[in-house]
Image: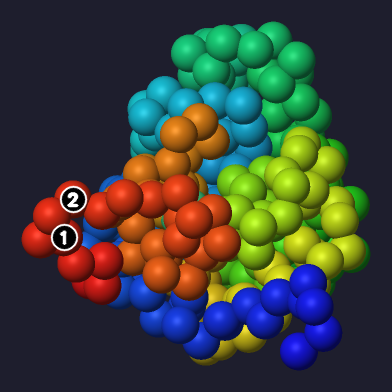
Amino acid sequence: MPRGKVEFPYSSVRKKLLTWFRKNARSYPWRTTGNWFHLLMAEMMLRRTRADQAARVYSRFTDRFETPADCQTAGPTELLEIFKPLGLQWRARQLLETLDYLSDSYAKRTPQKSDDLLAIPGVGEYANSMLRNRLFNEQLPALDSNMARVICRINGWKYSAESRRKKNVIAVAHQLVQTKSSRELNLAVLDFSALVCKPGKPDCPLCPLVRMCSLGGKTVRRPVGFHAST
Ligand code: SF4
């Protein structure tokens, strides 16, 4: 292997992450829904909001509205009242704009492809990939700053807010989810990056990837009697 070139251990990382996830997955109501509209709205609500905060709004919203057409029975006042706990006015306005579009365009049908999703106000590249992965089972990564941070740390690459747009990070993310468990793997990375490979100080001593991670391998001292494999 040329000096400096890193071979990413895809198979081992997938296996370890999925094993970890099956024991440590967080539980949120949008993770079990098969309703594309609810899933899309969850994604919009989660933007810059804590998941537990979004979960309360999500449950109230989905109890009341099953389809975009149902929202036509509600006025902006009721909708804004439901969205109020999310806190950000710009997002409440964006949600109304999204609902207007969905009520017009998808009252009785479902988005079928990437172009459909990208045309929905508020849906960007991340939401597009995440939704295609969840709805159509396409093997696409939900590549956000969290997934980028994990990939950079494992590879020993410098991480920044721009890392998720770097070609090498994008390539690894795409390759990582080339598995029939891609939906579960995307969720596994999300939870792993929130609970173990955290933005501040990662919990390397408790990490199932420690033996294959550039950062963990160099910096971690494991407690006596600890076994990294799970
Ligand atoms: S060893 Fe540490 S830095 Fe590496 S993936 Fe695990 S938690 Fe993240």
The amino acid on which the numbered mark 1 sits, given as a three-letter code, is Phe
Q: Where is residue 181 in the image (x, y as percent from the top left)?
A: 48, 81
Q: Would you call the spot at circle 2 few (<14 residues within 10 Å), some (14-19), or many (20 or more)?
A: few
Question: Is label 1 in a helix, a strand or a loop?
Answer: loop
Question: Is label 2 in a helix, a strand or a loop?
Answer: loop
Image quadrant in which you'd find residue 139: bottom right
- Residue 223, labelled with which disc? 2
- Residue 226, labelled with which disc? 1
Residue 207 shows in the view: yes
Residue in view at x 83 percent, y 42 percent: 162
- Quadrant of the frame with the C terminus: bottom left
Q: Would you call the spot at circle 1 few (<14 residues within 10 Å), some (14-19), or many (20 or more)?
A: few
Residue in view at x 82 percent, y 84 percent: 2
How is colour applied across the structure in the image?
A: rainbow
Image quadrant in which you'd find residue 59: top left
Question: Is 70 placed above or below 114 here?
Answer: above
Q: Position of residue 41 (x, y in %)?
A: 59, 42
Nearer to the camera, 126 or 12:
12
Residue in view at x 26 percent, y 72 percent: 229
Q: How far apart are marks 1 and 2 (CA)?
A: 5 Å
